[in-house]
């Protein structure tokens, strides 16, 4: 077969190369790699998803989403299978999980395909009915820690494999019994910060292994209801009990106390957070805020308005397909 050198061909004006149709094979020093895998899993990763919550005077099963790199109001995604609040949420680059929650207290885990829209489907069960667990993940494993189990808070950590369906398995224990914790991750470490009863403790785990959490350092103040998000390098913790507007940060691969980052536009608790590799998002909050705001994770500074949720609500859950646990 003779060689057809397309790099030597231009249009008449010399302004562009050729348009090629019908070619089946070619040889070159560089070339195009065609996408593979299910079509619903292709495309960019840049979506944050918010689910459930309490929208006074009642709960909601609404799921909505944003494109994290832009700004604007949330759009409808679908519905949870039931009205639910205080669930833990985590995600891979393709699938989002919502575990546990209240209305009533449940152990159910459901899932969505983040790149599409639609209602949740049944995934599996947590070890026991739990509300207000924290959740974080790598690209393969989702981890749920703490929460409230009748009759008290728990320190149990449990995990699932996100790509499959199956019940959670025991991972280890947090350093104390607590709920309403801020959580985030790198691809290696999971972080659990603050919690109820009020504490400033930060715990960490190695996601790919199992075992008890270890002490990481401390936040500047003891609060529950704080929320966390991350790039693969830095974790951001914002808001919390007594409607604090404090944002702090840690470097996930090290150990040490949190440092000041800036302030939220509105101090609040009961909000939620998610992230891409560059932006952290904080949304909703008690008593019924519809605020969505963002920070640039690699810098420091105050949060900036992003847009609005469809309605004011708190005790909602969120995840994204581009968070720090998936790598940058």
Image (tube, helix red, strand yellow):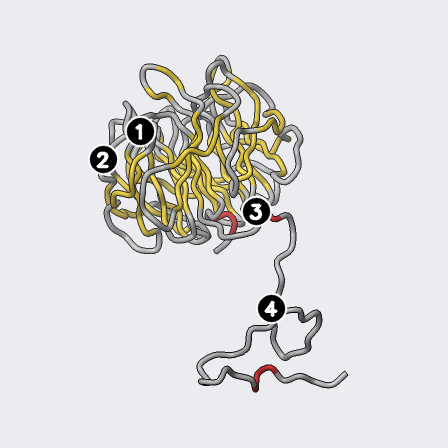
Which mark is first along the chain, 1 or 4? 4
Mark 4 or 1, closer to the camera: 4
Dividing the image into 4 quarters, which one contains the N terminus? Answer: bottom right
Distance between the alpha carbons at the discs numbered 3 and 1:
28 Å
Distance between the alpha carbons at the discs numbered 4 and 3:
26 Å
Badge 3 density bin: few <14, some 14–19, many ≥20, Cα 10 Å? many
Which mark is first along the chain, 2 or 3? 3
The residue sitting at 60% across, 26% down in the picture is 122
Labelled disc at residue 32: 4
x%, y% of residue 306? 29, 43
The residue sitting at 50% across, 36% down in the picture is 117
Q: Which residue is mark 2?
A: 266
Determine whether label 3 and label 2 are within 8 Å by CB. no
Q: Which element is circle 1 on?
A: loop
Answer with the quarter of the image where residue 282 lies.
top left
x%, y% of residue 285? 31, 29
Distance between the alpha carbons at the discs numbered 3 and 2:
32 Å
| Residue positioned most to the right | 1
Distance between the alpha carbons at the discs numbered 1 and 2:
9 Å
Q: Which residue is mark 3?
A: 139
Which mark is first along the chain, 2 or 4? 4
Q: Is residue 154 above or below residue 292?
A: above
């Amino acid at each position: 077969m003779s060689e057809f050198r397309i790099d030597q061909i231009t249009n008449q004006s010399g302004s562009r190369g050729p348009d090629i149709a019908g070619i089946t094979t070619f040889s070159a020093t560089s070339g195009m790699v065609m996408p593979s895998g299910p079509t619903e899993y292709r495309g960019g990763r840049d979506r944050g998803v918010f689910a459930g919550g309490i929208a006074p005077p009642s709960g909601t099963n609404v799921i909505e989403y944003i494109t994290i790199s832009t700004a604007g109001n949330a759009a409808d995604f679908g519905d949870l299978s039931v009205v639910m609040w205080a669930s833990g949420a985590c995600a891979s680059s393709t699938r989002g999980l919502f575990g546990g929650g209240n209305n009533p207290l449940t152990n159910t885990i459901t899932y969505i395909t983040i790149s599409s829209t639609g209602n949740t489907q049944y995934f599996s069960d947590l070890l026991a009915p739990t509300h207000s667990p924290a959740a974080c993940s790598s690209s393969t494993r989702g981890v749920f820690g703490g929460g409230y189990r009748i009759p008290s808070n728990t320190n149990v950590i449990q995990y699932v494999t996100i790509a499959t369906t199956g019940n959670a398995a025991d991972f280890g224990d947090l350093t104390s019994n607590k709920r309403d914790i801020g959580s985030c991750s790198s691809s290696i470490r999971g972080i659990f910060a603050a919690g109820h009863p009020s504490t400033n403790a930060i715990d960490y785990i190695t996601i790919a292994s199992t075992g008890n959490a270890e002490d990481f350092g401390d936040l500047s103040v003891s609060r529950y209801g704080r929320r966390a998000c991350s790039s693969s390098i830095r974790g951001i913790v914002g808001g919390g009990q007594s409607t604090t507007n404090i944002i702090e940060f840690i470097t996930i691969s090290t150990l040490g106390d949190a440092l000041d980052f800036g302030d939220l536009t509105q101090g609040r608790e009961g909000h939620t957070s998610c992230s891409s590799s560059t932006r952290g998002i904080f949304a909703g909050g008690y008593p019924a805020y519809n605020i969505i705001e963002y920070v640039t994770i690699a810098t420091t500074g105050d949060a900036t308005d992003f847009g609005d949720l469809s309605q004011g609500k708190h005790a909602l859950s969120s995840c994204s397909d581009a968070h720090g646990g998936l790598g940058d």
